Image: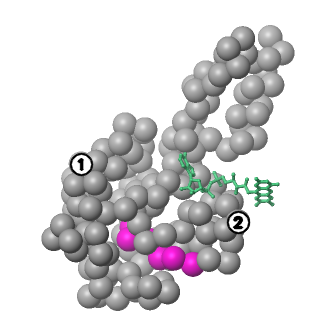
Amino acid sequence: MGTVARHGTITDSATNDSMAAQGTDTGTLRAALEEHVDGEVRFDAGSRAAYAHDGSNYRQVPIGVVVPRSVAAAAVAVAVCREAGAPVLSRGGGTSLAGQCCNEAVVIDWTKYCHRVVSVDPAAKTAIIEPGAALDKVNDAVKVSCRR
Ligand SMILES: Cc1cc2nc3c(=O)[nH]c(=O)nc-3n(C[C@H](O)[C@H](O)[C@H](O)COP(=O)(O)OP(=O)(O)OC[C@H]3O[C@@H](n4cnc5c(N)ncnc54)[C@H](O)[C@@H]3O)c2cc1C
């Protein structure tokens, strides 16, 4: 199983420092995520390359990617990563301009499944929204709710 060295080079021997401290390698982490998380677990080189950048010029190849099918599944992924000592990174649209969602971490991509606007309460000026919702979708839901 390949892991990632600085500057985005994919190697077969390097391990993330915090994971190594806990005696966990990426193969073990991937297996645990695949076993416990309801979602897509992508540790292949192509997926890691695809998630190595955001809207900025920064490049950091992640340890792997999890695409959870629910918020609860994402919580399980975080728990598995915590157990392994692996850093996690929450990714929305990847439109950040200063490398905020590039890191040597397990990237959690919310956008595929966790993008519902659950409820909007105009009186209370609150909304419950899943983390992968695009801003336009949220704004549209708020406009509709506020017109009622
Ligand atoms: C053309 C353009 C113009 C812009 N103009 C402005 C501007 O005028 N003012 C301004 O302030 N910004 C501006 N931005 C930046 C933009 O607001 C941010 O890129 C955007 O807010 C990031 O949202 P995202 O969902 O794409 O997050 P990402 O880029 O995916 O992630 C950004 C950060 O948020 C974290 N994150 C993402 N999703 C979650 C989540 N669900 N829960 C917790 N953490 C999360 C990530 O870990 C990361 O640290 C602009 C960007 C573009 C492309």
- Which secondary structure, mark 2? loop
User: Residue tagged by mark 1?
Assistant: 36
Q: Is residue 112 left or right of residue 23?
A: right
- Prevailing secondary structure of the magenta residues: loop
Badge number at residue 117:
none
Mark 2 Cβ and ligand 1 under 8 Å apart: yes
Q: Position of residue 132 (x, y in %)?
A: 57, 44
Q: Is residue 14 or residue 10 the one in the foreground?
A: 14
Compared to 30, does 118 lie above or below? above
Q: Type of residue at label 2?
A: Leu
Residue placed at 25% from the left, 69% from the top?
19
The mark that comes first in sequence, 2 or 1, is 1
Quadrant of the rendered image containing residue 145: top right
Q: Which residues are magenta?
A: 59-64
Quadrant of the rendered image containing residue 34: bottom left
User: Residue tagged by mark 2?
Assistant: 97
Compared to 23, does 91 lie above or below? above
Q: Position of residue 73 (x, y in %)?
A: 35, 42
**Circle 1 residues within 10 Å: few <14, some 14–19, many ≥20:** few
